[in-house]
Image (cartoon, rainbow, N blue to C red):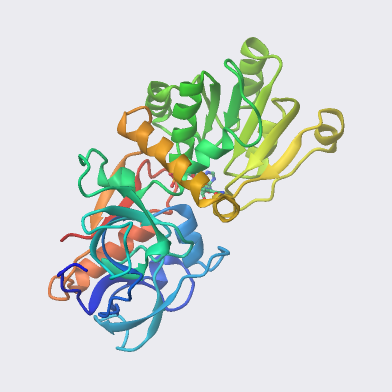
C-alpha cells in the first residue's frame, strides 16, 4: 500500500435533486473513505469533461444513476446532506492502492470502467474493478490529460459505430449530423483513416466557412449546412449516386429525416444522440422500398455486453491512435475547480457552476474540461 495520506473530504460539483444545471449544481466538499479496503484504489482525478450525457443526468433524463455521497462542508449544503456527483468520465492518477491490488500501481493513470462513476470530484476511493489502467506510471507520459479524460465516451462511440453496423469499404460514404461535435470529429478522422468518405451536416452560423475549413482539415469530404436538402442531395447525385451506407444521427427531428433521403438501399441509420430532443420521424417508403434499418446505439450497453478483453483491446487501439496523432480530440476550455474551501469564494463557486452549465449551450464551439489541481 502507498504511504500517501488520503484526505477525508474533497472538492466536488454536486446536486441534491435533478434540474437545470445552472440552478441545481453546487460546489461542495464531500466525504471520502479514509480506510482503504484491500481491493480499493485511491484516486486524484486530474480532469473530467462535461458531455451532453452528463447534463442529461443532471436534468434527471438519463438512465444511469449517480451514487449518493455525504456533504462534509462548503457553503452550498448543510453538512450531512446527501448529494450526487455527476460525471461519467475522467482521467485519474492512482495515489494509493489496497493490499490486495496487484494490477494497478501508484502513479498509473486510470479511467472509469463503470457507469455513474461520479467524476466531478477531486478525489475518489473505488474498487479496482471500477477502473481501467490507461497509462502505466513507468510509461513515457505521451498521453495528454484531456485525451485520457475523454477516452471512454466519444472516441469509442465513433469507433464502434463505424464497425458494428456495416462492413465499410474504401470509398463508401457515411453521412452525419452534429458533425462538429466531439463524436462527429472522431467519426471524420477515423473514417478518413479507413478510406471512407464523410458528408457532414452542421447547423448554419456566421462562422460556417471557418468551421467547414476546420472539419475539412480533419478529413471531412464535404461539409453542408444542415437544412439545405438540395445541397445534400446534390452532393450525392454528383459524387455517390448509390447513397450512403451509414447515417449517424445525434440530433433527431427533421435533421434525422433528411439523412434518410440520401441513404443507399439496405443502409443503416444509427441514432446515438438526441440534441434537439425531437423524435426521429421515418417515412414508411424508406423502410419498405429501401430497406433502411433504423437502429440505435448506446456505448454503455456495448460495454455491458462486451468482455473485459474486448474492451481493453478497443481502448488499446484508441490509445495507440491518439498517441500516434492519427486522431485528435476537440478543443477544450479548462475550468479549474478550487480544492480548498479557502479558495472557493462564492464568486469562484458561481463561476465554476456557470461554466459547467454553459457546456450545454448551442454554438459553443468547444468543450468544457473540469480540472482538479494537485
Ligand atoms: N449513444 C452513445 O453511446 C453516445 C456516446 C457519446 C455521445 N453521445 C451523444 O452524441 C451527441 C454528441 O456528443 P458530444 O459529446 O460529441 O457533443 P459535443 O462535442 O458536446 O457537441 C454538441 C453538439 O450538439 C450540437 N447541438 C447542440 N444543441 C443542438 C440542437 N438543439 N440541435 C442540433 N444540434 C445541437 C452542437 O452543434 P452546434 O455547434 O450547432 O451547437 C454540437 O455539434 C450527444 O447527443 C451525446 O449525448 C451518445
Q: Nearer the viewer, residue 123 or 371?
A: 123
Q: Can the viewer see residue 155 in this picture?
A: no
Quadrant in which the N terminus appears: bottom left
Name the residue: 36% across, 54% down.
111
Can you say whether 186 is above or below 110 in the image? above
Which quadrant of the structure image shows residue 320? top left
Can you say whether 337 is above or below 325 in the image? below
On the image, the x and y values in percent for residue 71 come to 32, 82
Can you say whether 157 is above or below 325 in the image? below
Name the residue: 39% across, 46% down.
151
Q: Nearer the viewer, residue 130 or 260?
A: 130
Q: Can the viewer see residue 168 in this picture?
A: yes
Name the residue: 28% across, 52% down.
109
Which quadrant of the structure image shows residue 69? bottom left
Q: Classify residue 7 as left or right of residue 324.
A: left
On the image, the x and y values in percent for residue 302 come to 58, 50
Q: Classify residue 240 as left or right of residue 19.
A: right
Can you say whether 241 is above or below 283 in the image? above
On the image, the x and y values in percent for residue 335 come to 25, 55
On the image, the x and y values in percent for residue 128 come to 37, 64
Q: Nearer the viewer, residue 163 or 12?
A: 163
Amino acid at each position: 500500500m502507498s504511504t500517501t495520506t488520503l484526505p477525508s473530504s474533497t472538492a466536488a460539483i454536486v446536486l441534491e435533486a435533478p434540474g437545470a444545471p445552472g440552478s441545481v449544481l453546487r460546489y461542495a466538499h464531500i466525504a471520502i473513505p479514509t480506510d482503504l479496503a484491500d481491493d480499493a484504489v485511491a484516486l486524484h482525478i486530474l480532469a473530467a469533461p462535461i458531455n451532453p450525457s452528463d447534463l442529461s443526468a443532471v436534468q434527471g433524463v438519463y438512465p444511469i444513476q449517480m451514487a449518493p455521497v455525504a456533504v462534509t462542508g462548503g457553503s452550498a449544503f448543510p453538512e450531512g446532506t446527501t448529494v450526487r456527483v455527476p460525471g461519467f468520465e475522467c482521467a485519474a492518477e492512482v495515489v494509493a492502492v489496497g493490499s490486495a491490488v496487484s494490477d494497478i500501481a501508484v502513479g498509473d493513470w486510470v479511467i472509469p470502467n463503470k457507469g455513474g462513476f461520479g467524476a466531478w470530484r477531486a478525489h475518489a476511493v473505488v474498487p479496482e474493478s471500477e477502473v481501467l489502467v490507461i497509462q502505466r506510471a513507468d510509461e513515457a507520459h505521451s498521453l495528454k490529460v484531456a485525451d485520457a479524460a475523454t477516452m471512454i465516451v466519444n472516441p469509442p462511440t465513433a469507433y464502434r459505430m463505424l464497425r458494428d453496423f456495416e462492413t465499410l469499404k474504401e470509398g463508401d460514404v457515411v453521412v452525419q449530423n452534429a458533425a462538429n461535435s466531439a463524436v462527429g470529429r472522431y467519426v471524420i478522422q477515423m473514417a478518413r483513416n479507413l478510406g471512407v468518405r464523410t458528408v457532414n451536416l452542421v447547423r448554419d452560423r456566421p462562422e460556417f466557412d471557418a468551421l467547414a475549413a476546420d472539419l475539412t482539415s480533419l478529413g471531412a469530404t464535404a461539409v453542408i449546412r444542415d437544412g439545405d436538402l438540395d445541397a445534400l442531395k446534390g452532393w450525392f447525385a454528383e459524387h455517390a449516386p448509390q447513397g450512403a451506407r451509414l447515417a449517424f444521427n445525434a440530433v433527431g427531428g427533421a435533421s434525422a429525416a433528411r439523412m434518410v433521403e440520401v441513404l443507399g438501399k439496405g443502409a443503416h441509420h444509427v441514432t446515438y444522440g438526441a440534441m434537439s430532443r425531437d423524435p426521429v420521424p421515418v417515412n414508411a417508403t424508406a423502410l419498405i422500398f429501401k430497406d433502411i434499418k433504423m437502429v440505435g446505439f448506446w456505448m454503455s450497453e456495448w460495454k455491458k455486453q462486451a468482455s473485459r478483453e474486448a474492451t481493453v483491446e478497443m481502448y488499446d487501439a484508441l490509445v495507440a491512435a491518439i498517441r500516434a496523432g492519427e486522431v485528435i480530440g476537440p478543443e477544450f476550455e479548462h475550468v479549474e475547480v478550487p480544492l480548498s474551501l479557502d479558495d472557493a469564494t462564492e464568486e469562484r463557486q458561481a463561476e465554476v457552476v456557470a461554466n459547467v452549465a454553459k457546456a450545454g449551450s448551442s454554438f459553443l464551439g468547444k468543450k468544457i474540461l473540469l480540472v482538479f489541481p494537485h
